Amino acid sequence: MKKEIVFLVIIIVFALGYFMGEYLGSKTVYITSQTKTPVITMPRLYFINESYSSFSSIRVPVVDQEGNDVVTLLDVQVIPGSGRVLANIDTLLFWVDTQNSIRTARSVAEDITGTDLSVYDIIYTVTANASVIEGASAGAALTIATIAALENKTIDPSVMITGTVNHDGTIGPVGEILAKASTAKSLGVDTLLVPLSQSFQVTYESKKHCEKIGFSEICTIETVPHKIDVSDQIGIDVKEVTTIEDAIGFFW
């Protein structure tokens, strides 16, 4: 009798163990994984049209190789690319000192706008009624036009700027301010932006001075400086600017 009871207990324990094992063993654990779609952040660039390009244009008063004042048109176009800088000089045979100005303008514009230009190409087109243009005086204008293209800004045509551009965005001195102011005035421009301390132009006049010494008269040629207010001389509003960021406020 005792053996039968023990045998029954063993069967019951075995059966319970079997059913518990089946229950626990067949329990399925579901692991949910969520795949996130990567977010691609593009540089901050404002596109003008559906072709994904941005464009700006600015006029610049410059002086050619013969010393003549020349109006130059600078066009800047930004398109998707690989960080290239392309220059279309149209009919100009030579364009001295401007490659470095373009590189600096691009770098300063990138810093000011916070745009990563490594995935964009910038095309600079220069049109002028001259065959040769020297000097880096268009550097500031190149920078302004590049910023305008990146931010889809419209440049005020009643404002012009002359000045070089430095790597930190400061504007450097240039020559022939009177000639450039005269060109700007003839185009109906209201305001010409110039580098610091260049709203006044110093000109020199040669005069013959003679005096008697005993029975002789001795004559010398003297150089007399004259300080000219460019605004008064040309009849145009001339403003001094120190940095590109100072100048931006005048253009839009």
Image (tube, rainbow, N blue to C red):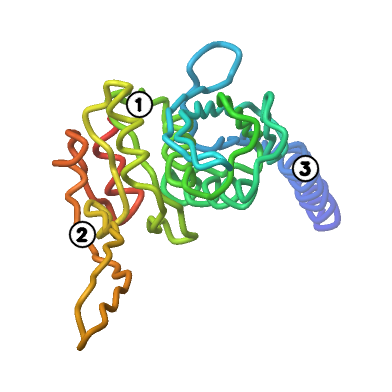
- Per the model, the C-alpha gap separating discs 1 and 2 is 35 Å
Closest to the camera, between mark 2 and mark 3, is 2
Which of these two is toward me, 136 or 208?
208
The answer to whether 129 is drawn above or below residue 164 in the figure is above
Which of these two is toward me, 157 or 5?
157
The answer to whether 104 is drawn above or below residue 35 in the figure is below
Horizontal side of 25 relative to 202 (left or right) equals right
Report the residue marked by disc 2. Answer: 226
Report the residue marked by disc 3. Answer: 25
Q: Position of residue 31 (x, y in %)?
A: 67, 39
> Is the residue marked by circle 2 packed among few (<14), some (14-19), or many (20+) residues within 10 Å?
few
Q: Position of residue 46 (x, y in %)?
A: 46, 26
Report the residue marked by disc 1. Answer: 155
Q: Quadrant of the C terminus?
A: top left
For image coordinates 36% across by 40% down, the residue present is 179
Horizontal side of 121 relative to 164 (left or right) equals right
> Is the residue marked by circle 1 packed among few (<14), some (14-19), or many (20+) residues within 10 Å?
many
- Per the model, the C-alpha gap separating discs 1 and 3 is 75 Å
Discs 2, 3 touching: Cβ within 8 Å? no
- Identify the residue at the far front of this view: 215
Q: Looking at the image, is mark 1 or mark 3 earlier in the sequence? A: 3
- Identify the residue at the far left of this view: 232
- Per the model, the C-alpha gap separating discs 2 and 3 is 103 Å
